[in-house]
């Protein structure tokens, strides 16, 4: 039964990630079209995706692990932002490096999506929204 619940949380996380990715990629592609440098466009898109992901994750994905309002919730938000910043750093590095090596920044962004997804899922599932952590 616990395995099934974990699977459902993971499926909801995938859906939340897809939504946040839409925000991220839409911003990224729009900024590229406006002529912004690829790594800065990737970082900007990722930043807006962070906000979208928190809103969905805290309300529809990790509902059992969300802390009550107050200091614990603020701590959890800070950890969430920390996990997002880790993903942002990884994304920016991959897109920046790929672009510097002459790769199409959109292809580099695709590689960054998989790496960032894996990193942030692990951090959020095991650290940010760890079951039993919420007050």
Image (spheres, rainbow, N blue to C red):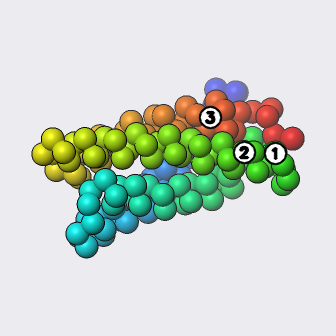
- Can residue 65 be seen here? yes
How much space separates mark 1 and mark 2, taking CA atoms?
6 Å
Which one is nearer the viewer's eye here, 4 or 68? 68
Identify the mark nearer the N-term, 2 or 3. 2
Q: Which residue is mark 2?
A: 76
Q: Residue at x 41, y 60 (%)?
A: 45
Secondary structure of the residue carrying tag 2 is helix
Identify the mark nearer the N-term, 3 or 1. 1
Q: Is residue 106 above or below residue 98?
A: below
Percent across and percent down for residue 83 are: 56, 41
Percent across and percent down for residue 41 are: 33, 60
Q: Is residue 69 above or below residue 66?
A: below
Q: Quarter of the image containing the N terminus? A: top right
**Number of other residues with Cα within 10 Å of mark 3, as a class: few under 14, some 14 to 19, many 20 or more:** some
Q: Which residue is mark 1?
A: 72
Q: Residue at x 72, y 45 (%)?
A: 76
- Asked if the residues shown at circle 1 and circle 2 are in contact, with their CB atoms under 8 angstroms apart, the answer is yes
Q: Which residue is mark 3?
A: 125
Secondary structure of the residue carrying tag 1 is helix
Percent across and percent down for residue 10 are: 56, 38
């Amino acid at each position: 039964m616990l395995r099934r619940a974990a699977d459902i949380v993971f499926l909801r996380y995938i859906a939340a990630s897809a939504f946040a990715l839409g925000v991220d990629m839409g911003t990224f592609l729009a900024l590229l079209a406006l002529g912004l440098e690829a790594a800065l466009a990737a970082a900007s898109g990722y930043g807006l995706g962070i906000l979208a992901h928190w809103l969905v994750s805290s309300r529809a994905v990790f509902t059992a692990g969300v802390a009550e309002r107050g200091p614990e919730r603020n701590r959890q938000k800070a950890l969430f932002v920390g996990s997002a910043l880790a993903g942002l750093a990884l994304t920016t590095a991959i897109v920046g490096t790929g672009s510097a090596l002459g790769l199409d920044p959109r292809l580099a962004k695709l590689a960054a999506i998989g790496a960032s997804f894996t990193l942030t899922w692990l951090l959020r599932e095991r650290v940010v929204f760890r079951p039993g952590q919420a007050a």
